[in-house]
């Protein structure tokens, strides 16, 4: 779920930061650039782990900033296909569920990857949402926001940025995790305890 990724980047350090120790100034600039950003095929940057090397310090003509080539490691959130993760329910609709880890909210469980047989019913507590029910041996088991939900990562996708986005569509997400609940032991934890 979490990986260290080695990155090399050419970084411009503004003149007002040159009074700070070099490592501290560069660390601050790296955090501004990468923290909470998704890098395609690497994942979501959680933290700058360390700085491996700093080369350069060139000042280009007409620019008061110095430019460095920095090698550093980032802690990245990138779940792998087949991984089992526990999350909380953020919202549900007739298309499926949206789950959250707290720091990452773009986890979707589509209707065809719900436990079989499942159906959506109007939520009596929230008129704008539905509640999914799994039927097993004549009993109905709800998927609601009370329990944590275990899901298996079905796919991790890095969609390209759309030129135009329809008004009715959900906001663009640079990394989307598709989950599955259609396996033993998956779903709300209370089902299996």
Image (spheres, rainbow, N blue to C red):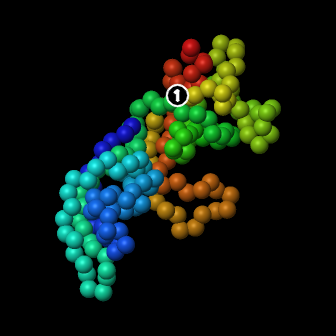
The image position of residue 21, as x and y in percent, is: 28, 61
**In this rendering, does residue 158 appear at all?**
no
The image position of residue 40, as x and y in percent, is: 39, 55
Using the rendered view, name the quadrant where residue 148 is placed.
top right
The residue positioned 27% from the left and 62% from the top of the image is 22
Tell me the quarter of the image containing the N terminus.
Answer: top left
Task: Give 40 or 52, whichever is nearer the viewer.
Answer: 52
The image position of residue 93, as x and y in percent, is: 68, 40
Around disc 1, counting alpha carbons within 10 Å, would you say few (fewer than 14), some (14 to 19), or many (20 or more)? Answer: some
**In this rendering, does residue 155 appear at all?**
yes
The residue positioned 67% from the left and 39% from the top of the image is 92
The image position of residue 132, as x and y in percent, is: 68, 31
Q: In this view, does 62 lie to the left or right of 145?
A: left
Q: Is label 1 in a helix, a strand or a loop?
A: strand
Q: In this view, does 44 lie to the left or right of 98?
A: left
Using the rendered view, name the quadrant where residue 171 is placed.
bottom right
Task: Give 140 or 48, whichever is nearer the viewer.
Answer: 48
On screen, 154 above or below 160?
above
The residue positioned 37% from the left and 72% from the top of the image is 16
Tell me the quarter of the image containing the C terminus.
Answer: top right
On screen, 27 above or below 105?
below
On screen, 147 above or below 29?
above
The residue positioned 46% from the left and 37% from the top of the image is 154
Using the rendered view, name the quadrant where residue 181 is placed.
top right
* Outermost residue to the front: 19
Residue where numbered disc 1 is placed: 150
């Amino acid at each position: 779920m979490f990986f260290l990724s080695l990155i090399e980047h050419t970084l411009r350090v503004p003149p007002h930061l040159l009074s700070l120790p070099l490592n501290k100034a560069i660390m601050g600039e790296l955090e501004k650039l990468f923290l909470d950003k998704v890098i395609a095929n690497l994942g979501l940057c959680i933290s700058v782990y360390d700085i491996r090397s700093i080369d350069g310090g060139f000042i280009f003509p007409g620019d008061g900033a110095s430019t460095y080539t920095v090698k550093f490691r980032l802690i990245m959130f990138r779940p792998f296909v087949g991984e089992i993760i526990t999350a909380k329910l953020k919202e549900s609709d007739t298309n499926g569920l949206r789950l959250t880890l707290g720091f990452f909210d773009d986890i979707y469980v589509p209707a065809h990857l719900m436990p079989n047989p499942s159906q959506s019913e109007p939520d009596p507590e929230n008129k704008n949402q539905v509640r999914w029910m799994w039927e097993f041996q004549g009993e109905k088991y709800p998927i609601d926001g009370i329990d944590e939900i275990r899901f298996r990562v079905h796919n991790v996708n890095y969609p390209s940025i759309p030129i135009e986005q329809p008004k009715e569509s959900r906001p663009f997400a640079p990394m989307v995790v598709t989950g599955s609940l259609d396996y033993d032991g998956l779903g709300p934890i209370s089902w299996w305890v």
